[in-house]
Image (spheres, rainbow, N blue to C red):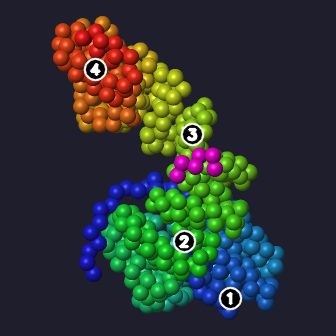
Amino acid sequence: MQLLMIQFKKRKKAKSIAMAFSGVILTAWGANAQTLQEAIKYTDNEQFETATRAFKSLLKGQPSNGDIYYYLGENYFKNEDADSASYYYKKGIETAPTSPLNFVGQGKLMQFEGKVTDAKVQFDKALTMGANKNTVVMLKVAEALIKAPQKDLDQASKLLEVVTKLEPKNPEVYILTGDMFLEKTDGNNAIANYKKAQDLDKSSVKAILRVGQLYGRAKNYTLALDKYQDAAKVDSSFAPAYREQGELYYMAKQYEKAKTKYKRYLDLAGNNFSAKQRYASFLFLNKEYKESISLFNELQKQDTTKNFVNRLLAYSLYETGDYPNGTIYINRFFNRATIEKTKIIASDFEYRGKLFSKTGKDSLAIIDLEEALKMDTSKVDLFSDIGAIYLKSKKYDKAVKSYERKLKATNKLNANDYFSMGRAYFFNQDYMNADTCFGTVIKLQNTLPIGYYWRARTSNKLDPDGKLSLAKPYYEKYVELTTDSKKYLKEISEAYEYLGYYYMLQKDNVKAKELWMKLKEIDPNNNKAQKALESIK
């Protein structure tokens, strides 16, 4: 296979926003599962809705089977629904108190909540019930210790060593051992264990996927793509392989390929809610806002309880200029987030602030944009948004300070920033600093007329009697560059008036008449042009 020749840029923000919004997407397997293993496979393939139906179908026939409750809880946990996961772990304990796995589930939730001591009690209870010989329990405890925010890799390692001795040909133990070494940033041992799992089970797509993810983490994107494609070859219905390919192509800015892989991912997931939510998130990140809005609206009809839909729908509506509806959905998001204690991220305040600004609530907009900056200091462009709001509100001193804050944070401003900062100085009657700003605009964008126009206006203020003719070269350049005299009638009329008077003062009536005639051509009813032409005669 040819090397994947792609250049990657850091996409941590987009990645962080995708992690915060996404659900998951997976494989469609058809009818209800006949066995617990088939139902678990739906979860492994991230086909969570299908898995839920399968587990519940199994529970109808085996209502006292604690393992089914546990794996149904796991299905919810992996679909980022901790409340439902907790419900089924507890239900499993009530229904089958001698089944150890649900204690592992409860412990895992505690571990993820930072309640390490309480989690240990649950884990120890589960391990004791399994007489420290139940390899499934040991693997699940080890997995929780490896993947929780506060990890205990040493304890996980001890459990995995025991399982390896008891079941040396179990590929799952080597996958988890690889995960453990990966958390220790020991890539060599991680890949060795993943490959061991592959040797034991040639059809283990999870092991192949893990190797690909390891390569991706090491920024060896070509080998990562190879592995994801290998996983898809081994099991063409394994949806995560297509998801990973889609995200890899997205990072590489190969958007059409990314979209194709995500669509395949969506097809395999049977168009279930989780699949559609992740695909809608991808469309948003790919700036295909109209498509994302359509899909988010569809998701709203399916389930109104998912607050992330309110979030991204608000974002997408803002990007398409539908500010009133965007405001409705961002307010829904914040209201529900307060009730549900959902984590609010910087971009939530950013978009609400921008929507407030677009709907005339400038004071509230500034509060939110400042909050977004506190949460994420890399969002330096928000200084420009804040400056623009102050400029619109005629709070010129505060507008200038906003652009100064951006300059301090970045050591540079773009042409738009200098232009807005120059106007703030101008309206605050600080003409020297305004002149400097507009001069910088001209240096950065020397073919745009607007910089010359505003520098001419500023020069007029610095040279009110016109003795130094400071504005002349800038008005001349503005006239030279401006091609649409109807659209910019006010500005170009001002330029012709200045230049016409200038040449009259210079006693150059020929040139003066030429300029006044040009003004009369574009504005036949211009009284100044009429009077000037009469006086020249």
Q: Residue furthest bottom?
A: 34
Along the viewing direction, whichever of 194 and 424 lies nearer the viewer: 424
Residue type at the position of mark 3: Lys
Quadrant location of the C terminus in the rendered image? top left
Note whether 105 is above or below 334 in the view shown.
below
Q: Which residue is mark 3?
A: 358
Of badges 3 and 4, nearer the viewer stands: 4
Q: Are marks 4 and 2 in contact (CB under 8 Å)?
A: no
Real-space CA distance between mark 1 and mark 3, rounded to the nearest whole angstrom? 49 Å
Label tally: 4
Q: Earlier in the sequence, mark 2 or mark 3?
A: 2
Above or below residue 407? Residue 121 is: below
For label 3, the crowd category at 10 Å Cα-Cα, with few meaning under 14, some 14 to 19 and many 20 or more, is some
- Which one is earlier in the sequence, the residue at label 4 or at label 2? 2
- Name the quadrant of the N terminus: bottom left
Q: Return the disc, 4 or 1, that comes first in the chain's sequence.
A: 1
Q: Earlier in the sequence, mark 1 or mark 3?
A: 1
- Residue indicated by mark 4: 516
Mark 4 touches mark 1? (CB < 8 Å):
no
Viewer-nearest of labels 1 and 3?
3
Query: Which three-letter amino acid code belongs to the residue tagged 1?
Result: Asn
**Does dot 3 land on a helix, a strand or a loop?**
helix
Residue 213 visible (yes or no) = no
Range drawn in magenta: 320-325
Neighbourhood count class around disc 2 (C-alpha, 10 Å): few under 14, some 14–19, many 20 upward: many
Which residue corresponds to mark 2?
A: 156
Relative to 267, 38 lies left or right: right
In contact (CB < 8 Å): disc 2 and disc 3: no
Label 2 SS: helix
